[in-house]
Image (cartoon, helix red, strand yellow):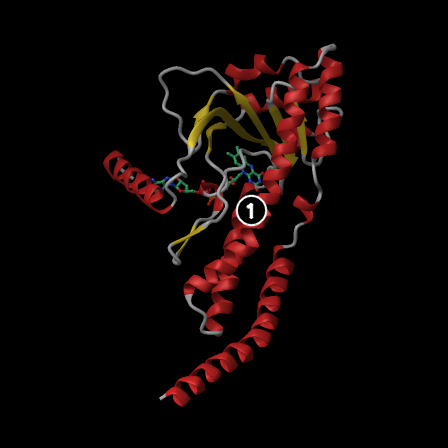
């Protein structure tokens, strides 16, 4: 896409966002994420590096996430606040030389420093992190649904933003199919979509608030860096909630839609009866 086309798209998107969700303007929050895929076989040489998803936390708010993927891929993602001048933040990935940041990780334990050195030899992409006001509802004007990172930037806190975006899409597709089969208007379908997804995100925000509280305590407490990191990791693991990982969107959507069907069975005859009585009253008056 050419620069003119891109600027036009950006402008249109900004106008659109401001009209539809007026208070929702994503802003660069000063943090960036750096993602590199290294070889699993090479990562296996690093002693005490778990072959499971691990967030390695620091009291400064910086973290490193290590995670084995499919085939020979092993993901290394680091999030940090770095000083930068004269550069426009961008949400999409750009090539970055991770050697520039290695010194920022001197406080991390040996396996993390080793995997980061491995990552610095690979091809790292830099992504700037954008956040925005939390939305209470993700629908507008009875015909627009807002989905994915644009609606709910989680800043990598759960390492599951793509999973959340796919859950949004799954829910939207199922709700639209359900509403079409029952001749329910689009606005009704979107209200159902919102009633499934917005409480989910509100629940995630409550977990994020707990993480923020832990970070505030960790930043001001006394002790050696090792003791402080130890206590921080302990508190973060206590604040984490496992339901986020085990959330079954298929079951949630199926339950919500079958409850809506049961409600309709009970409310529709009553609504019809009320309409009939009203018509009867009008006839008698006439
Ligand atoms: C380093 C890193 C590691 C991550 N690791 C994980 C992980 O392990 N697991 C996980 O579940 N999630 C992970 N995520 C999060 C995940 O990538 C996002 O949550 C997910 O991609 C959101 O999907 P989306 O479709 O909402 O947005 P995006 O994937 O960001 O898609 C938006 C698209 O819109 C395009 N676009 C933007 N502006 C314009 C414009 N003006 N005109 C035209 N096109 C435009 C962008 O180029 C992009 O292609 C990670 C994110 C980062 C940055």
Q: Is residue 114 visible?
A: no
Residue at mark 1: C-beta within 8 A of ligand 1: yes
Give the number of callouts: 1
Quadrant of the rendering where the N terminus is positioned: top left
Please name whichever residue, 31 or 202, is drawn nearer the observer in this view of the structure.
202
Please name whichever residue, 108 or 73, is drawn nearer the observer in this view of the structure.
108
Residue at 62% over, 26% down: 64
Residue at 43% over, 28% down: 28
Please name whichever residue, 107 or 81, is drawn nearer the observer in this view of the structure.
81
Tell me which corner region of the image, top left, top right, bottom left or bottom right, holds residue 221: top right
Q: Dot 1: what SS?
A: helix
* Crowdedness near tag 1: few (<14), some (14–19) or many (≥20) residues, C-alpha within 10 Å: many
Q: Position of residue 13 (x, y in %)?
A: 32, 42
Q: Position of residue 182 (x, y in %)?
A: 49, 74
Q: Is residue 95 visible?
A: yes
Q: 261 above or below 1?
A: below
- Reading the image, the residue beneath label 1 is 164
- In the rendered structure, the answer to whether residue 158 lies left or right of residue 22 reads right
Q: Position of residue 230 (x, y in %)?
A: 75, 20
Q: 283 above or below 92?
A: below
Tell me which corner region of the image, top left, top right, bottom left or bottom right, holds residue 202: top right
Q: Position of residue 86 (x, y in %)?
A: 35, 17
Residue at 53% over, 16% down: 101
- In the rendered structure, the answer to whether residue 15 lies left or right of residue 76 reads left
Q: 266 above or below 241?
A: below
Please name whichever residue, 265 or 254, is drawn nearer the observer in this view of the structure.
265
Residue farthest along the front direction in this orientation: 285
Q: 250 above or below 258?
A: above
């Amino acid at each position: 896409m050419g620069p003119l086309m891109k600027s036009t798209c950006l402008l249109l998107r900004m106008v659109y966002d401001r009209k539809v969700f007026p208070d929702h303007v994503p802003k660069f929050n000063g943090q960036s994420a750096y993602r590199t895929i290294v070889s699993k076989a090479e990562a296996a040489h690093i002693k005490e590096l778990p072959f499971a998803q691990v967030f390695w936390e620091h009291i400064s708010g910086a973290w490193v996430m290590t995670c084995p993927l499919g085939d020979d891929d092993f993901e290394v993602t680091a999030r940090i606040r770095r000083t930068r001048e004269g550069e426009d933040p961008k949400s999409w990935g750009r090539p970055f030389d991770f050697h520039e940041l290695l010194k920022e990780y001197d406080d991390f334990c040996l396996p993390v420093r080793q995997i980061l050195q491995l990552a610095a030899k690979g091809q790292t992409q830099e992504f700037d992190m954008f956040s925005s006001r939390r939305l209470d509802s993700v629908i507008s004007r009875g015909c627009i649904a807002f989905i994915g990172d644009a609606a709910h930037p989680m800043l990598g806190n759960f390492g599951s933003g793509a999973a959340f975006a796919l859950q949004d899409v799954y829910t939207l597709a199922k709700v639209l199919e359900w509403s079409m089969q029952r001749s329910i208007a689009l606005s009704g379908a979107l209200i159902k979509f919102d009633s499934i997804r917005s409480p989910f995100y509100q629940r995630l925000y409550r977990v994020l608030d707990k993480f923020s509280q832990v970070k505030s305590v960790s930043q001001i407490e006394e002790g050696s860096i090792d003791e402080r990191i130890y206590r921080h990791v302990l508190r973060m693991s206590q604040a984490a909630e496992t339901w986020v990982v085990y959330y079954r969107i298929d079951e949630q959507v199926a339950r919500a839609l079958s409850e809506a069907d049961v409600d309709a069975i009970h409310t529709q005859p009553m609504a019809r009866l009320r309409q009939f009585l009203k018509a009867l009253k009008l006839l008698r008056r006439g």
